[in-house]
Image: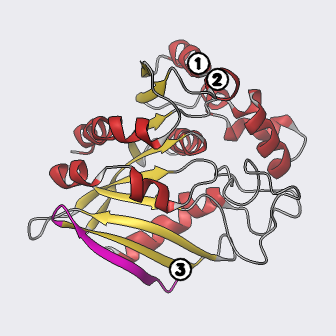
Amino acid sequence: MTMQTISTARAFGGTQGVFSHPSTATGTAMTFAVYVPPLPKGQRAPVLWYLSGLTCTHANVTDKGEYRRACAERGIAFIAPDTSPRGDDVPDAPDKAWDFGLGAGFYVDATEDPWQPHYRMRSYVEDELPALIAAEFPMLDLSRQSIMGHSMGGHGALTLALRNPDRFRSVSAFAPIVAPSQVPWGKKALGGYLGADRSAWRGADAVAMIEDGMRVPAILVDQGDADPFLAEQLRPQLLAAACADAGIDLTLRMQPGYDHSYYCIATFMADHVAWHADRLG
């Protein structure tokens, strides 16, 4: 697990870094970003994971997410992985579609060929990258972790939190895909990566996971009401209904006039950082 530093830069008294390493989960080199806040001597920072959406890399949120000031003020580290394996040997959608293949790993472990050897983003984000962070960043406290994400990454954050309620103290999302089994993006991705048996999809669908008994104490979601994907792909009302039935405290904030872009994310990012900080201690 040899990690290489691609870049570092000073920001709000802390350090923004970008790193790469050879991944055993994906069989490729993987790139990720870590912001380490300024820390008093002897203190360690809790960790906030951020999972990005379709077509994105770590760079979208590091360039446009506007999280560093809030993380510096609350002493929180911010980690942003990539969204899929990459490389000349990694298969892509035959039609180069933007919603499947490269940049669209959907945070699942593929079971179908030709995706299975490399598209193992669940194992990468859930197991391999945290182990690397623990080994390489001793100033970070992985006993205090929270997770958030956008769109496809919101789906990833919700499913990882539901699978690991003892690991993540809180979960939030911007415009998440809450029920991929019921929307076109999700049906394409889960069918392609996991196969035609829809029972195999339930463990990668937040609404289905809640219906099947998985729980987190609370969820924060910000969703723009001018998001062009709202009605067909995102459908937050399905999450609201599932949480109501399960007794999960969902704060769903419909934001007037906001769309699916990083303008929305940047506007409400500090709210999310503060919400997690209150739960991370």
Give the side of residue 256 with respect to residue 30, left or right. left
Q: Amino acid at mark 2?
A: Glu
Q: Nearer the viewer, residue 15 or 248?
A: 15
Describe the element under mark 3 as helix, strand or loop.
Answer: strand
- Residue type marked 1: Ala
Q: Which residue is mark 3?
A: 21
Kindly report which numbered mark, 1 or 2, lies closer to the viewer in this rendering.
1
Residue 92 at x, y = what percent? 80, 63
Q: Earlier in the sequence, mark 3 or mark 2?
A: 3
Binning the other alpha carbons within 10 Å of mark 1 as few (below 14), some (14 to 19) or many (20 upward) gives: some
Quick one: 255 or 146, which is closer to the camera? 255
State how the image is colored: secondary structure
Q: Please report contact status of discs 1 and 2: CB closer than 8 Å, yes or no.
A: yes
Q: Secondary structure at mark 1?
A: helix
Whether 100 is drawn above or below 252: the answer is below
- SS at mark 2? helix
Disc number placed over residue 211 in the picture, else none: 2
Q: Is residue 214 magenta?
A: no
First-in-chain label (1 vs 2): 2
Query: Residue at 65% across / 70% down in the picture?
Result: 25
State the residue position of label 1. Answer: 242
Question: Disc 1 or 3, which lies upstream in sequence?
Answer: 3
In this rendering, the count of numbered labels is: 3
Observer-side mark, 3 or 2, equals 3
Q: Position of residue 165 (x, y in %)?
A: 46, 41
Q: Is residue 7 above or below residue 253?
A: below
**Gap in Å between the C-alphas at discs 1 and 2?**
7 Å
Seen in the image, is 44 located left or right of residue 132?
A: left
Q: CA distance from mark 1 to mark 3?
A: 38 Å
Label 2 Cα neighbours within 10 Å, binned few <14 / some 14-19 / many ≥20: some
The magenta span reads 1-13
